[in-house]
Amino acid sequence: MDGSLDFIQWVGEDMSLKILMCLEDPSDLVRTGAVSSSWRQFVITHGLCKKLCLRMFPEASSFTRVIECDHMGKSVATGTDDSAEWTSLVTEHKVYALLSRGLTTSTREKNCMSDSIFASSTDNYPEESIKNTLEQSDRVNNRATYWSSKGESDPAAPETLIYKLSSQLCLITEVHVHPFQAYFQFGFPIYSAKAVRFQMGHPKVPLEKYRDEVDKFLDEQDLSDDKFVWTYHSPEYPMAQENRLQKFKLPEPVLCIGGILKVELLGRVQTQEMDGLYYICINHVAVIGRPLSPLFDVKMIDERGKCTLTYNPYTFSLKRVELIKEESSSQSHFRRFSESIRTWEQVIISTLRGAGPLMIDDNDSDHEYLD
């Protein structure tokens, strides 16, 4: 063995990079870094976990900086001089490995909707406000609950609904829209749109600027479409004129950075007998996916969408810690392998193997959206 060569030294740096970049699972990269100190240095120095994350989710290119927070929520010191650069690389390696796994883990999805922000028009405010679309039922306290646009003589006239998601970082897979059937009008008309399209992005300035002292959004005109930057645009989907929750699956899961969803309702199909004008009415909107907070968050989003990714390891609940311990004790063969690995790397590998799902939600109330 005295004449043996390290694999990376033997094939060379460039070829080693090409080989390792063929890996598709972040856990494989973490295991590669656990082989030896030289392999660990190679993986970290070349930012392989970050490159894999960007390859799987190009939206992550918006992150210009990565910060790890301590138990007080403050940035962990990175040291000085030569140690600062290495500490920064280690932090990036750790955070991007965990983020990649969090984005690819198969966990229960939920409705990520948090609040309504803006409607391009409303027929009777507040009775027919966009707020009503947050309710899954079409009746509350024996009253119809829905959003209605203003009437238009042009059937091609579009409408826009804008919503705030439950986290500034969400992985979105589907959007659900339920057109409203006016059961109180003759013929029970359904006021759907011809088609629907979705955009995701972030506000140009923090939304807190548009909130009043009771934490409600101010006049809808203050939060019109031009107050946001849209970084994702979905294909156009036809909408059926049917009284049911219609599910629109995105071509690929989308990492929404900024936590804002726009629903574009394109074209009208139903006139109201009373005035002969075309309307669009929506009973309910839901956005299905996984919020990545509080473990991950973003700060300082500028108009170009550039921001800082923050990692908050101390947000793990006691339940998550117990899950990691339980899984570690039941997998003795893997524990022996990881005994020589540094403490934070043990956490990464335990998480990557599914011992501690990054996003665990004990609230199962939203599972009906996936039936």
Image (tube, rainbow, N blue to C red):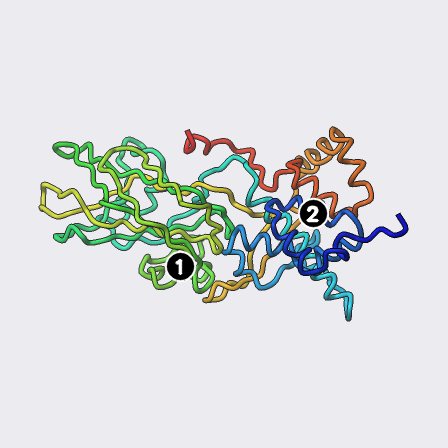
Q: Does 235 sit left or right of 169 as displayed?
A: left
Amino acid at dot 1: Trp
Amino acid at dot 2: Val
In the picture of the structure, the residue carrying the numbered disc 2 is 30
Residue 161 in the image, given as x and y percentages of width and height: 32, 51
Which residue is rendered at x = 52% and y = 52% of the image? Answer: 57
In this rendered view, identify the residue nearer to me: 165 or 212: 165
Residue 230 is tagged as: 1
Q: Nearer the viewer, mark 1 or mark 2?
A: 2
In this rendered view, identify the residue nearer to me: 177 or 206: 177
Give the farthest residue toward the bottom: 81
Q: Quadrant of residue 118?
A: bottom left
- Does 228 sit above or below residue 354? below
- Answer few, some or many: residues within 10 Å of disc 1's Cα (few below 14, many 20 plus, some between 14 and 19): many
In this rendered view, identify the residue nearer to me: 265 or 145: 265
**Are the residues tagged 1 and 2 within 8 Å (C-beta)?**
no
- Answer few, some or many: residues within 10 Å of disc 2's Cα (few below 14, many 20 plus, some between 14 and 19): many
Q: Does 147 sit left or right of 277 as displayed?
A: right
Residue 65 in the image, given as x and y percentages of width and height: 61, 63
Residue 221 in the image, given as x and y percentages of width and height: 31, 60
Q: Does 274 sit left or right of 184 as displayed?
A: left
What secondary structure is found at the residue carrying circle 2? helix
The residues bearing labels 1 and 2 have C-alpha atoms spaced at a distance of 34 Å
What secondary structure is found at the residue carrying circle 1? strand
Q: Quadrant location of the C terminus?
A: top left
Which residue is rendered at x = 50% and y = 31% of the image? Answer: 364
- Does 317 sit above or below residue 97? above
Which residue is rendered at x = 12% and y = 52% of the image? Answer: 153
Residue 209 in the image, given as x and y percentages of width and height: 44, 62
